[in-house]
Amino acid sequence: MPGRILIVEDTPSIALAYAAHIEAMGHAAEIAETGAAARALLAGASSFEAVLLDLQLPDCNGLELLASIPSLAATSSVIVVTSDGSINRAISAMRLGAYDFLVKPLTPERLKTTIRNALERSTLSREVAQAKQVARRDHFHGFVGQSAAMQAVYRAIENVADSKATVFVTGESGTGKEVTAEAIHRASGRRNEPFVAINCGAIPESLLESELFGHVRGAFTGAIENRPGAARAANGGTLFLDEICELDLKLQVKLLRFLQTGLVQPVGSNRSEPVDIRLVCATNRDPVEEVAAGRFREDLFYRLAVIPIELPPLRQRGNDLDLIAQTFLERYAIEEGKTLPPLSESQLATLHRHRWPGNVRELQNAIRRAVVMSGGREISLPIPQEGASPSVAEAPELSAGGWRGLTLDQIERLAIEQAIADADGNLPNAARNLGVSPSTLYRKRERWLSANHGVK
């Protein structure tokens, strides 16, 4: 692989000779004739795999330059070159992190061999550093976890971040699909541009097209002003469409056209305008099944699923549960102004006995509830029974008359949460079982979570 080599040499004929040999090897060479010029190049955005450093410079000693930039030897293979071959100078150079020490005059063969070895060493050092960084990562752009499954997710996010290809995120409810979209955005070159999220299941079908593409004043009843829409609001950045499988088939056609043309046409307008967005979609359904059932267009699916990322459920993430629970405990203890001890082994064992059908979101709300209800010194973790949501576990049997004394709103909430639990946390399926639209359940759950200080 071609490398970049910096030649710090004040004799032009020697510097040009070095550069000619290096470029003949297929590498790029840059020349600095003074220490100041070298500092300017080293301070730039681009790094050098190797540095040929002369010790006798017009404005400084090469060893002084090396000592004044501690990171240089750590990021580049520094080859000290001088006409003074004293052993003391060689030792001083090596102590400062120099890779090799050469005495002038240099033969072309000696120079090429040293450069080749130095570049191999730099490549190996970078690979080792990257491997160590990946191995120890337990936090990543909003994620908490160091399991092998999550390391694979982190690598996938890094690999796709700067691509313009559409990403399709799948996984159970509460696994972190929006966190994935935000992580892709923050890891990309679009990080300083808008990130706009739309939940396709939480918005009535009659308003969703306007939410996505905007509308002009008077386009329909209630359209009292122009609205840009999510696509135009995200111009230059990232648009995240959650619960994409909830889109009506007619709107799927318009989304497909938008992806093909890059043009947005607001509702009620006959003009289109281009936008530049990175699209990330997500669903907790199986999109292949949705396509087979005719509820999702096959051509749109293949257009969206250029890069698929599947998030593992919490029950498959091993000891990540411990790390996540402790992170939430510390966060909410600070938020509530309480001092709480770390979770004990028995408490962690209790957490591991639950399957967490609501995944990280369910764990998050359970820990927050425990912190809020604690007396300030320790917390109690009443984990719900399998298949039941936290509020349902302790709920009375409605069929046995246990509804007496409850308000209508409380009874409705218990019925909805039980339906969601019966659907293994799949809210769209629960909505179908209850005979209501998913947007109805999304709105009710958001209201309940806000009332309980829950986090979306």
Image (spheres, grey):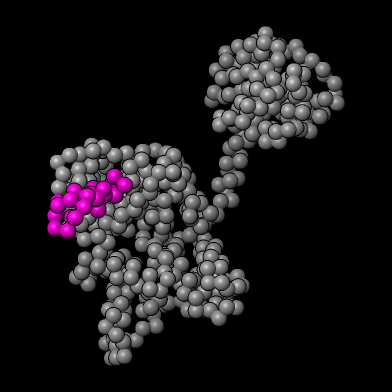
Q: Residue furthest top?
A: 13
Choose between 317 and 30: the one closer to the eye: 30
Rendered-image quadrant of the N terminus = top right
Depth check: give the residue in front, 47 or 21.
Answer: 47
| 199 relative to 329 in the view: left or right | left
On the image, the x and y values in percent for residue 185 come to 42, 46
Residue 158 locus on image (x, y percent): 46, 43
Q: Residue furthest front?
A: 224
Is residue 293 rendered to the left or right of residue 321?
left
Residue shown at the point (85%, 26%) measured from the top left: 88
Query: Residue 37, located in which quarter of the rendered image?
Result: top right
Q: Is residue 282 magenta?
A: no
* Residue 217 colored in magenta in the image: yes
Asked whether residue 292 appears in the rendered view, the answer is no
Residue pictured at 60% horizontal, 11% vertical: 20
Q: In the figure, is residue 208 to the left or right of 153?
A: left
Name the main secondary structure of what is drawn in magenta. loop
Residue 192 appears in the figure:
yes
Residue at figure coordinates x 60%, y 70% from the top left: 342
Q: Compared to 249, does 204 lie above or below?
A: below
Q: How many numbered discs sit on the rendered protein?
A: 0
Residue 170 position, x and y percent, is 35, 54
The answer to whether 285 is drawn above or below residue 80 in the figure is below
* Residue name at image x 39 percent, y 63 percent: 456
Q: Quadrant of residue 172?
A: bottom left
Give how far across and how far down residue 163 sits, in percent.
Answer: 39, 38
Q: Which residues are magenta?
A: 211-233
Judged left or right of residue 95, residue 28 is left
